[in-house]
């Protein structure tokens, strides 16, 4: 096992900069997730650590070793891809043991280790099967098994669950987390799926356009996003963003006045006549009872219901601000079921309001 340190890593492809200013250190044994939209540079970072790409500049350490010029094979990392890449003509057992066989490890030791790995991944009853006789989830477990059997210093996973269907993805995600708890191998996991990032990570690295936006544990990133990109990327449904202009009494949100308490105002150092984006999470919006127009005061917003999605325990409501294209996601209890076309008066928890420039 080892820590992994990136110092000011940059990778250019011809004149296109894929990643730059990439600096972080993953302590030994931690599970870190690189997350961000497609094309933000996640895979390039992972492939650089694996030795499948070379950094244009910067330093990369695995343990105490500077590995910039060390070939992939000698880096002692194992990588698992989304498309498993198993050997079709080999059995499960041969696939898992392959890396060890290549290193000419003693046959008895290989057998023992394959058995242990297979057991920890519930594959021990499938050892003689060929990949095509396995389900997608089982194939992915074999791919994981092959990586684990090599007992690498670092485990690199590139969207390993994205080819699995929803239920299997949830199950395998939980297994992966448990496996990491058991083995304690330093793991770097790439995904565009914020749910995977939130549930798996000790620390999340949020990337956008080749640059780090924020590094932190899932809860603190969710509670204190560094910028609007991070705020709207992490969270499902995502944070609502409302364009607004600050006037002396509060925010003008598409013609509706949203007054804010003096303490919040002071904290935010707002400028008169300035445009801002207000951020509010769906769970921080409440529906006033009864939602009649007369009762509305100025810390409320009137919206018109567009779509109602009952999800069982909760209901997700999409509602628009009249006369504007802005749509809000509101998450309420499962027993609340307004109808499309209804007008609602909303109360925002202003202590949970984010203001972005
Ligand atoms: P992600 O994994 O977040 O989807 P990538 O790391 O694959 O993003 O890509 C980051 C950027 O680098 C993209 O703009 C992509 O087009 C570019 N890129 C990646 N690999 C290559 C390559 N081999 N040649 C040219 N451009 C590349």
Image (spheres, rainbow, N blue to C red):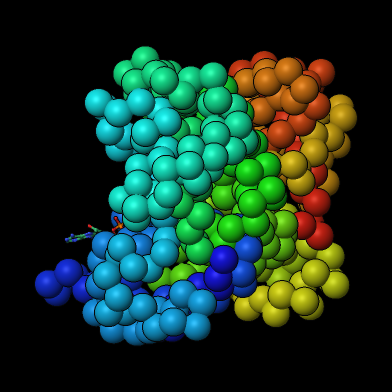
On the rendered structure, is 223 left or right of 152?
A: right
Seen at 67% across and 76% down, the residue is: 270
Comparing 188 with 249, the one in front is: 188
* Displayed quadrant of residue 13: bottom left
Seen at 75% across and 25% down, the residue is: 314
Q: Is residue 148 above or below residue 10?
A: above
Q: Quadrant of ligand 1?
A: bottom left
The spot of residue 39 in percent (x, y) is: 31, 55
Q: Is residue 61 above or below residue 160?
A: below
Outermost left residue: 14
Comparing 138 with 196, the one in front is: 138
Comparing 121 with 3, the one in front is: 121
The spot of residue 79 in percent (x, y) is: 39, 52
The spot of residue 340 in percent (x, y) is: 61, 18
On the question of residue 254 being in view, the answer is no
On the rendered structure, is 168 left or right of 351?
A: left
On the rendered structure, is 58 left or right of 34?
A: left
Q: Quadrant of the N terminus?
A: bottom right
The spot of residue 304 in percent (x, y) is: 63, 29
Q: Quadrant of the C terminus?
A: bottom right
Seen at 45% across and 52% down, the residue is: 150
On the question of residue 335 being in view, the answer is yes
Seen at 35% across and 63% down, the residue is: 50
Comparing 108 with 232, the one in front is: 108
Q: Is residue 70 above or below residue 276?
A: below
């Amino acid at each position: 096992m080892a820590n992994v340190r990136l110092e000011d890593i940059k990778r250019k492809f011809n004149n296109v900069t894929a990643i730059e200013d990439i600096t972080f250190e993953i302590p030994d044994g931690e599970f870190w997730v690189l997350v961000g939209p497609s094309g933000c540079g996640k895979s390039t970072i992972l492939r650089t650590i694996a030795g499948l790409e070379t950094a244009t500049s910067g330093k990369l350490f695995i343990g105490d070793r500077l590995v910039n010029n060390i070939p992939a094979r000698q880096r002692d990392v194992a990588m698992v891809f989304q498309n498993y890449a198993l050997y079709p003509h080999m059995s499960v057992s041969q696939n898992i043991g392959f890396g060890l066989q290549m290193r000419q490890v003693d046959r008895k030791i290989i057998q023992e280790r394959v058995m242990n790995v297979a057991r920890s991944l519930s594959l021990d009853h499938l050892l003689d099967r060929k990949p095509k006789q396995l389900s997608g989830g089982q194939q992915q477990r074999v791919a994981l098994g092959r990586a684990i059997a090599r007992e690498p210093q670092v485990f690199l996973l590139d969207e390993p669950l994205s080819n699995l269907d929803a239920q299997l993805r949830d199950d395998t995600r939980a297994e992966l987390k448990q496996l990491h708890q058991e083995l304690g191998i330093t793991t770097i996991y790439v995904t565009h799926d914020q749910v995977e990032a939130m549930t798996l990570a000790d620390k999340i690295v949020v990337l956008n356009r080749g640059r780090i936006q924020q590094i932190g544990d899932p809860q603190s990133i969710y509670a204190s996003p560094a910028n609007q990109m991070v705020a709207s990327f992490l969270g499902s449904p995502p944070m609502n963003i409302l364009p607004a202009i600050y006037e002396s009494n509060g925010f003008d949100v598409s013609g509706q006045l949203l007054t804010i308490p003096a303490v919040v105002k002071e904290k935010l150092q707002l400028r008169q006549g300035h445009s801002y984006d207000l951020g509010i999470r769906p769970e921080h919006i409440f529906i006033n009872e009864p939602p009649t127009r007369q009762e509305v005061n100025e810390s409320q917003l009137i919206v018109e219901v567009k779509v109602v999605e009952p999800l069982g325990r909760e209901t997700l409501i999409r509602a628009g601000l009249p006369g504007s294209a802005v749509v809000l996601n509101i998450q309420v209890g499962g027993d609340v079921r307004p109808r499309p076309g209804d007008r609602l008066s909303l109360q925002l928890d202003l202590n949970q309001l984010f203001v972005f420039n």
